[in-house]
Image (cartoon, helix red, strand yellow):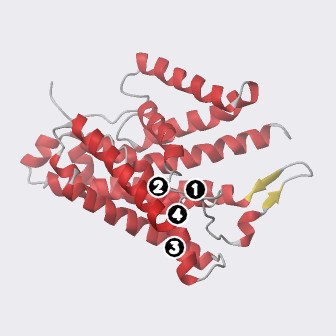
Amino acid sequence: MGDILPFLFNGLSISSILLLTSIGLSIVFGMMGVINFAHGEFIMIGCYSSYIVSLVLGNEGTWFTLLIAFFLSFILSFGIGFLVEKFIIKRLYARPLDSILATWGVSLILQQLARNIFGSNNVNAPMPKILNTGWKVSEDITLPYNRILIIFISLLLCLFVYYFMYKTPKGRILQSVMQNRSMAACIGINTKKADSFAFSFGCGLAGIAGICISMLGSIGPSTGQNYIIDTFLVVILGGIGGLRGSVLGALLIGMSSPFIESITSSSMAKVIILCLVLITLQYKPQGLSPMKDRTID
């Protein structure tokens, strides 16, 4: 038990972080077919949101400032995502290669803006002091409260996204456009507005992920890039467009990483996981749990 519990907790913690970073990307990729290479920078915006709140409201980390930071991260990422979609992505829907270059350019611009505003050095966002401690399960095992909170937030976010996508009129509109864009347009759905909202909403979710990442340590202009590769792996492995696929992909990669690292090394674990994903795609090219299209062949 003493060996298994930290292993399971570490894997679940990694899975929760990957799930938070991948939900928004899965929605954007599944609905619009846009490979958003700037997704990591929207995570970075969320990271800096907690730092901004601490500067404005005081350097002491409290639950109130953390709550404000969550709202600010979503609003900032949503708003910047809306502007990026309106002035850049909107003109590149039928040009996938151009959209890759454009989002990569947006990524570089946002990173440089962060360096100009906050500096190149990493900074720490003050958090409630209790998050720096942990739950002492036994003499040898302590579970950090910050990672417990991240697991709890990922569960809440999953429930929220599920309810929004499947139980609300706006979510059903997004679902219909994902499943059959031409039919959705035929019944009067404004697919352009749906695309704009989906991209902005996905960026907003990435901002929330950034707040959670800022709980783990220092943040900087390249923080989002540290997670972007694993985020894409989760989306591709699980299946594009579906919440269930993101959950499945995050759990598989997150739970397997600590095990592989324990018998090899962290760098070799990434190589092995990438190879396993490639092998899986040979047999499941659409991922393990892709969204079903409502189209007639």
Q: Is residue 169 above or below residue 296?
A: below
Looking at the rendered structure, the kind of residue marked 3 is Ile
Taking the spot 75% from the left edge, 39% from the top edge, the residue there is 7
> Which label's residue is closer to the chain start, 2 or 1?
2
Q: Which residue is mark 3?
A: 52
Mark 1 to mark 3 CA distance (whole Å): 15 Å
Report which quarter residue 14 is drawn in. top right
Mark 4 to mark 3 CA distance (whole Å): 13 Å
Q: Which residue is mark 4?
A: 119
Mark 3 to mark 2 CA distance (whole Å): 14 Å
Tell me whether circle 4 and circle 3 mark residues in contact (CB < 8 Å): no
Residue at the extreme bottom of the image, as rendered: 57
Q: Which residue is mark 2?
A: 43
Tell me whether circle 2 and circle 1 mark residues in contact (CB < 8 Å): yes
Mark 2 to mark 1 CA distance (whole Å): 8 Å
> Which label's residue is closer to the chain start, 4 or 1?
4
- Answer few, some or many: residues within 10 Å of disc 4's Cα (few below 14, many 20 plus, some between 14 and 19): few
